[in-house]
Image (cartoon, grey):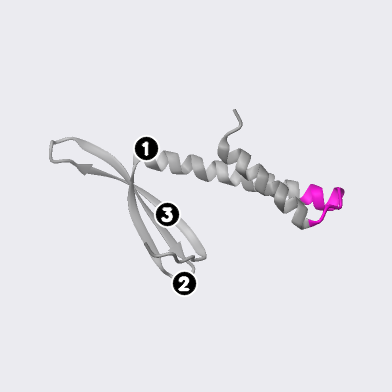
Amino acid sequence: MSKHLFELAQIETVSGTAHDPDGTWRGFVTVRAIAKDGSIMSGQLSLAECRQMALRFLETAAGGDQDAIVFRVMTRDLDLPAEVVARVVMAMREERDDGVG
């Protein structure tokens, strides 16, 4: 697997349907990640996979908000060095990844 990091311009999703050999119709989602340099990576997800990905995006965005708030409050209001706050934020991320409950 190639390990390139691109600066993303956007992510597009398009729903679709496919007719299986057994005669059933199934839904799917095509996902395209478009880099600022014009590179495109695309693939298909099942509907369940797409829903799981959407939840992960929302959870990650909420975590990023929390990280920024902690950095801002601890460096500005408590005058702690960024290196110390970074260790706190990393510990918080590990706790989030492990699950709270």
Q: Amino acid at mark 3?
A: Glu
In the figure, 49 relative to 5: above or below? Answer: above
Left or right for 24, reference 37:
left
Which residue is under mark 2?
A: 37
3D distance between C-alphas at marks 2 and 1 = 31 Å
Q: Which residue is mark 1?
A: 48
Residue 72 place in picture, x, y as percent:
77, 51
Residue 96 placed where, x, y %? 60, 39
Q: Which residues are magenta?
A: 72-81
**Whether label 2 touches label 1, CB < 8 Å:** no
Tell me how far mark 2 sits from mark 3, CA to CA.
Answer: 16 Å
Q: Earlier in the sequence, mark 2 or mark 1?
A: 2
Which mark is in front, 2 or 3? Answer: 2
User: Residue 61 bears which disc, if any?
Assistant: none
The N terminus: image quadrant:
bottom left
Q: Is residue 90 above or below residue 51?
A: below
- Considering only order in the chain, which callout, 3 or 2, is on the residue closer to the N terminus? 3
Give the quarter of the image for residue 39.
bottom left
Q: Are marks 3 and 1 in contact (CB under 8 Å)?
A: no
Q: Residues within 10 Å of mark 3 (few under 14, many from 20)?
A: few
Mark 2 surroundings within 10 Å by alpha-carbon count, few (fewer than 14), some (14 through 19), many (20 or more): few
